[in-house]
């Protein structure tokens, strides 16, 4: 029954209210024809238009996470000896300091534990209102279960096919809930993916009619609002300059609008984007 699957309208409105203040922090590298460039931290909000650079130091800034106060952003940087160090950026002053802690951001939840026994390993995700769990079963179905009891509510076959007509292989798919708990974004190993160009084909599962819609191909997809997803496009080799034999990896942050099923690039050109994360606005 729909009432068993979806939270009441009042809960949805409470969950949706703070989403308008959320923004995306991501790692962005703008290549130059000469000189060394770095992955810097940039920020984008749907209302703010163009992305804005928030770090400027001569080191790579990768895998950002945000403190709950909205002022600090943690990131990884690889040293010349290939070791990884953790840093913290003060978004008000621009100052960076090295930190030892490498735990997850307070804004991220690892999900419920234990999970339903039928779930494939590391696929279970709790709904925003914490009443349900979604997971993948045998790489072929999506299971929705009651969070307190772990009892199954519904099991929906994936059943999608490549453009060749062949069914997707039974991989442990990625799942994420929309902020209003009405839709799942499900990623399966991309039709044109490889060991060097990893990518996922993403599909929307509307839980009320239990219907699937193909969305986009990319990586690191994140819900920003119930109608907006951001993701990184599949990376590609691009010449550093016109006619140059030297190529660099490029990939771009992109917005996907759920109501229209259309994508719009947020960044473009000779640049490389990595690991977006959703943060609370200050």
Image (cartoon, rainbow, N blue to C red):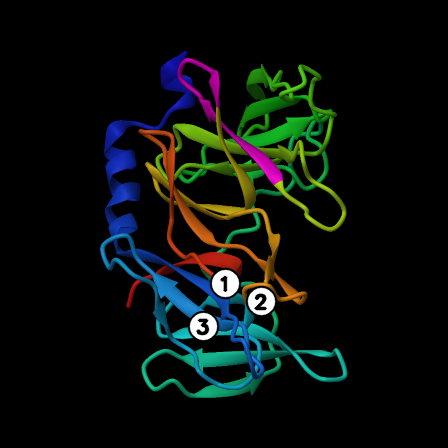
Numbered tag placed on residue 270 in the rendering: 1
Mark 1 and mark 2: span between their CA atoms?
A: 7 Å
Residue 33 percent coordinates (x, y):
54, 76
Q: Nearer the viewer, mark 3 or mark 2?
A: 2
Q: Main secondary structure of the magenta part?
A: strand
Residue 67: tell me if it is visible: no
Which quadrant would residue 9 be assigned to in this image?
top left
Name the residue located 74 percent from the left edge and 25 percent from the top edge.
169
Q: Tell whether label 2 touches label 3 (CB within 8 Å).
A: no
Residue 13 percent coordinates (x, y):
24, 38
Name the residue located 43 percent from the left edge and 56 percent from the top edge.
268
Which quadrant of the figure contains the C terminus? Answer: bottom left
Numbered tag placed on residue 240 in the rendering: 2
- Which residues lie in the magenta part? 200-213
Numbered tag placed on residue 73 in the rendering: 3
Secondary-structure class at tag 2: loop
Residue 271: tell me if it is visible: yes
- Crowding near pointer 3: few (<14 within 10 Å), some, many (20+)? many
Residue 203 percent coordinates (x, y):
52, 28
Image: 180 above or below 212: below
Q: In the rendered structure, which disc, 1 or 2, sits on the residue that comes first in sequence?
A: 2
**Direction from residue 96 to residue 248 in the image, left or right:** right
Name the residue located 45 percent from the left edge and 59 percent from the top edge.
269
Q: In the rendered structure, which disc, 3 or 2, sits on the residue that comes first in sequence?
A: 3
Q: Nearer the viewer, residue 27 or 270?
A: 270
Mark 1 and mark 3: span between their CA atoms?
A: 25 Å
Q: In the rendered structure, which disc, 1 or 3, sits on the residue that comes first in sequence?
A: 3
């Amino acid at each position: 029954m729909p009432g068993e699957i979806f939270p009441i309208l009042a809960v949805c409105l409470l969950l949706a209210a703070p989403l308008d203040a959320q923004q995306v922090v991501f790692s962005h590298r703008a290549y130059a024809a000469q000189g060394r460039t770095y992955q810097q931290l940039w920020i984008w909000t749907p209302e703010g238009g163009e992305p804005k650079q928030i770090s400027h130091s001569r080191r790579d800034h990768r895998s950002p996470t945000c403190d709950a106060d909205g002022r600090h952003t943690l990131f990884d940087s690889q040293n010349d000896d290939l070791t990884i160090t953790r840093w913290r950026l003060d978004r008000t002053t621009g100052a960076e300091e090295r930190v030892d802690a490498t735990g997850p951001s307070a804004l991220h939840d690892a999900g419920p534990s234990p999970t339903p026994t039928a779930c494939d390993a590391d696929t279970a995700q709790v709904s925003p209102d914490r009443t349900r769990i979604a997971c993948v079963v045998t790489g072929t179905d999506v299971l929705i279960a009651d969070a307190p009891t772990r009892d199954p509510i519904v099991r929906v076959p994936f059943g999608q096919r490549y453009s060749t007509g062949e069914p997707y292989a039974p991989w442990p798919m990625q799942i994420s809930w929309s902020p209003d708990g009405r839709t799942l974004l499900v990623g399966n190993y991309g039709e044109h993916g490889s060991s060097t160009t990893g990518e996922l084909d993403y599909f929307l599962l509307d839980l009320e009619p239990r219907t699937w819609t193909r969305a986009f191909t990319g990586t690191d997809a994140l819900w920003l609002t119930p109608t907006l997803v951001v993701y990184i496009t599949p990376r590609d080799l691009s010449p550093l300059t016109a006619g140059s034999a030297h190529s660099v990896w490029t990939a771009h942050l992109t917005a996907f609008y759920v109501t229209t099923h259309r994508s719009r690039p947020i960044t473009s050109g000779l640049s490389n984007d990595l690991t977006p994360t959703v943060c609370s606005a200050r």
